[in-house]
Image (spheres, rainbow, N blue to C red):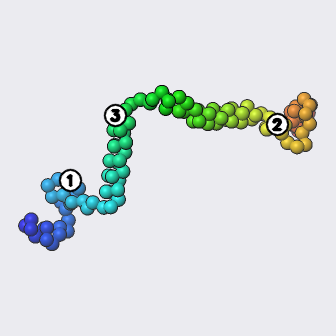
Amino acid sequence: MWLGRLLFGARSVPGRQWSGKHRRVRKVTGHMKFNRVQKMLQIREVEKMIAVPYLTVDEEYGHIVEKKIEKQSEFFLHQRKMRNFGLDVLGANSPHAKNDAKCYLDHLNVAKKWNPVD
């Protein structure tokens, strides 16, 4: 029975096909091998870093300055955008805007109606 199943190939696998006594054997593909090698390389790197868990004094000095400056510039740019929200809504940055208080408040008079609508 087993030799026949092996030689002729089983047409169907009873129950769950990837687990159990009569399971289908999964073929190992090149992609699976590649993933396993990558995982092993990553584990080797982590083990190497764990073996020496500190930086020397020279390596530690200023090792994160560039990343910190980049984060700060992104944060300040975001803050600047949030701060300038109101001026863009009022049209202060448009080329035809005047730089006086009356210009900023003129938009309030657009919908002013003193008589009730009939």
Kind of residue at badge 3: Ala
Kind of residue at badge 1: Ser
| Element type where label 2 sits in the image | helix
Q: Residue 62: percent from the left, percent from the top? A: 55, 30
* Residue to which mark 1 is pinned: 19
Residue 113 seen in the figure: no
**Nearest to the observer: residue 82 or residue 106:** 82
**Does residue 30 appear to the left or right of 112 in the view shown?**
left
For the point 33% across and 38% down, the residue is 47
* Residue to which mark 2 is pinned: 90
Point out which mark residue 7 bears: none
Image quadrant of residue 10? bottom left
Q: CA distance from mark 1 to mark 3?
A: 38 Å
Q: Earlier in the sequence, mark 3 or mark 2?
A: 3
Q: CA distance from mark 3 to mark 2?
A: 60 Å
User: Residue placed farthest to the top in the image?
Assistant: 57
Q: Residue 26: percent from the left, percent from the top? A: 24, 59
Point out which mark residue 51 bears: 3
- The quadrant of the rendering that contains the N terminus is bottom left
For the point 37% across and 42% down, the residue is 45
| Element type where label 1 sits in the image | loop
Q: CA distance from mark 1 to mark 2?
A: 67 Å
Q: Residue 33: percent from the left, percent from the top? A: 31, 57
**Cβ–Cβ under 8 Å for marks 3 and 2:** no
